């Protein structure tokens, strides 16, 4: 029976259930690890999640070759736009908690912000370096996108590789910063809001790097053309989102909230 509409009705798939189940295993594993039990359950959850991602992406790539037309791609663009909007609201919660504590400091922390017992990180040391790294990565991924639009796939992949290297460098610098910070997560309201906001941003950068690596391999396999490369375009949008969030983090938490 031929279709009388431009939409693709997906076949039944095990991946949504597998994704939810792996997330459940990760939560259980996190609780067990926090209570000083072994971490095998946590690693198993992440392994199952990685397996789910690979299988799900494989099926979508197969669908893209035969089923995805302009109408479906338009829907995808709205979908990634709404996803990024939901992620923005996720970070709004952390900014809300931070500004609530910083603009109205309580007596318990001395009615000052940052609290007197906190030695903040110099914003123009490692955070400034990371800002330059992310801004440069935003430029290289945009450059890669323009090359893709012009059909210069090889040149696009070279810029994409540079973006991946810069994103990985950002994560390395942030890990070094965390290791050498003078305050721990349990040290009060400042450390908890600092690590929650910057830590979840780092996690989003990690996800973005994984997206870009996937796009690099897909580009090498010939999955992208000048007129059909939404997977790469979505990854680029997501990367610009983490860039913008970092600028807000740098200005509000690192710079305005510094006692240097």
Image (cartoon, rainbow, N blue to C red):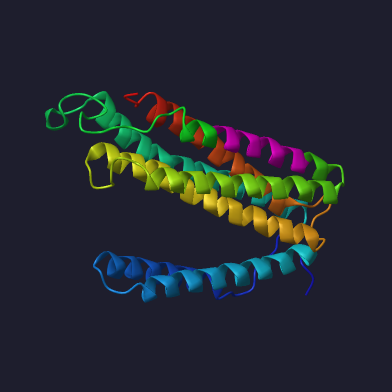
- Residue 172 vs 20, above or below: the answer is above
Drawn side of residue 12 relative to residue 200, left or right: right
- Please tell me which residue lies in front, 61 or 117: 117
Q: Position of residue 131 (x, y in %)?
A: 54, 33
- Residue 102 vs 179, above or below: the answer is above
Q: Position of residue 197 (x, y in %)?
A: 39, 41
Q: Main secondary structure of the magenta part?
A: helix
Residue at x 82% of width, y 42% of height: 147
Drawn side of residue 245 relative to residue 217, left or right: left
Can residue 123 be seen at all in this image of the molecule?
A: yes
Range drawn in magenta: 131-145
- Please tell me which residue lies in front, 257 or 227: 257
Which quadrant would the C terminus be assigned to in this image? Answer: top left
Can residue 6 be seen at all in this image of the molecule?
A: no
Which quadrant would the N terminus be assigned to in this image? Answer: bottom right
- Residue 13 vs 171, above or below: the answer is below
Q: Position of residue 89 (x, y in %)?
A: 43, 41
- Please tell me which residue lies in front, 90 or 188: 188
Drawn side of residue 163 relative to residue 258, left or right: right
Drawn side of residue 200 relative to residue 7, left or right: left
Residue at x 20% of width, y 33% of height: 117
């Amino acid at each position: 029976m031929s279709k009388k509409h431009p939409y693709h009705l997906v076949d039944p798939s095990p991946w949504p259930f597998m994704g939810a189940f792996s997330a459940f295993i990760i939560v259980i594993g996190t609780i067990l690890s926090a209570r000083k039990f072994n971490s095998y359950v946590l690693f198993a959850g992440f392994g199952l999640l990685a397996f789910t991602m690979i299988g799900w992406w494989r099926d979508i790539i197969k669908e893209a070759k035969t089923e995805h037309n302009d109408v479906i791609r338009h829907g995808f663009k709205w979908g990634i736009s709404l996803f990024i909007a939901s992620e923005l609201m996720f970070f709004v919660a952390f900014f809300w908690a931070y500004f609530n504590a910083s603009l109205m400091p309580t007596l318990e922390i001395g009615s000052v912000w940052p609290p007197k017992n906190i030695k903040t990180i110099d914003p123009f040391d490692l955070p400034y370096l990371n800002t330059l790294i992310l801004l440069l990565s935003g430029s290289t991924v945009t450059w890669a996108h323009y090359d893709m639009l012009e059909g210069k796939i090889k040149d696009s992949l070279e810029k994409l590789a540079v973006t991946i290297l810069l994103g990985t460098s950002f994560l390395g610098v942030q890990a070094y910063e965390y290791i050498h910070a003078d305050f721990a997560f349990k040290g009060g309201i400042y450390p908890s809001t600092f690590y929650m906001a910057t830590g979840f941003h780092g996690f989003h950068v990690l996800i973005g790097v994984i997206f870009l690596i996937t796009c690099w391999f897909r580009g090498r396999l010939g999955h992208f053309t000048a007129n059909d490369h939404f997977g790469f375009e979505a990854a680029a949008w997501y990367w610009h989102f983490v860039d913008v969030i970092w600028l807000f983090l740098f200005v509000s938490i690192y710079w305005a909230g510094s006692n240097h």
